[in-house]
Amino acid sequence: MKALEEKILTEGTVLPGNVLKVGGFLNQQIDSDFIMEIGKEIARLYESEHITRVLTVESSGIAIAVAAGIALHVPCIFAKKHRSANMPREVYTASVYSYTHRETYEIAVAKDYLSSADRVLIVDDFLANGNAVRGLMRILEDAGAQLAGCAIAIEKGFQGAGDELRAKGIRVESLAIVDAMTDESVRFRAQ
């Protein structure tokens, strides 16, 4: 998605440790119109896949997942990182290590929200090491739900998780794939 690449170049910042900061439009302050365009593009890519649910992990992926869910006309579910008083006892869980926060979370989705009848699209803002996607895939497997694919806004191609998932036959559609980053530049993979 050329518009996303341009936005990354004009509004993104590379921080030490291969961190790409896009908080000004994607995950802290959200450019609402642009998020809806991302959702429409994800829906276009997966329109023939008979998606019944969109699944993400809180919190940065929620806006993109909701936009995709709206465009696909299906519910959006997000895995919670922390158990709350209003979460049911019956949940699917998986442990996920967050590279950004350097913390392991036990993500959870209420069993009421997923079933073996579901065909699910995983959506997230970033794909780097693939831990969040793998955790969500474990939850889908436990639920007996079918994985339709993964839609990612920004993939850090140089970290290899997207290519690893594709090699296993999993459909991964990333709207922008960053092949290299320095303090001065971001280089995208030709798609």
Image (cartoon, rainbow, N blue to C red):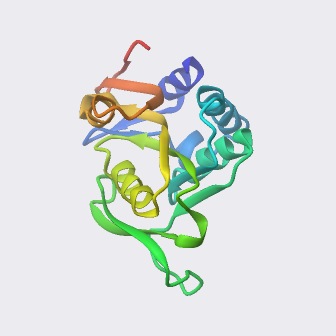
* Relative vertical location of residue 189 with respect to residue 87 in this rendering, above or below: above
* 85 on left or right of 52: left
* 171 on left or right of 18: right
Image coordinates for residue 125, horizontal then vertical, percent: 49, 43
* 160 on left or right of 44: left
Residue 36: quarter of image: top right
Can the viewer see residue 28?
no
The residue depicted at 46 percent of the width and 29 percent of the height is 174
The residue depicted at 67 percent of the width and 40 percent of the height is 31
* Relative vertical location of residue 18 with respect to residue 115 in this rendering, above or below: above
* 25 on left or right of 79: right
The residue at the far top in this view is 190
> Is the C terminus in the top left, top right, bottom left or bottom right quadrant?
top left
Can the viewer see residue 140?
yes
Image coordinates for residue 161, horizontal then vertical, percent: 29, 37
Q: Nearer the viewer, residue 55 or 125?
A: 55
Image coordinates for residue 55, horizontal then vertical, percent: 54, 53
Q: How many marks?
A: 0
> Is the N terminus in the top left, top right, bottom left or bottom right quadrant?
top right
The residue at the far bottom in this view is 85
The residue depicted at 34 percent of the width and 51 percent of the height is 134
Residue 127: quarter of image: top left
Q: Nearer the viewer, residue 46 or 34?
A: 46
Residue 129: quarter of image: top left
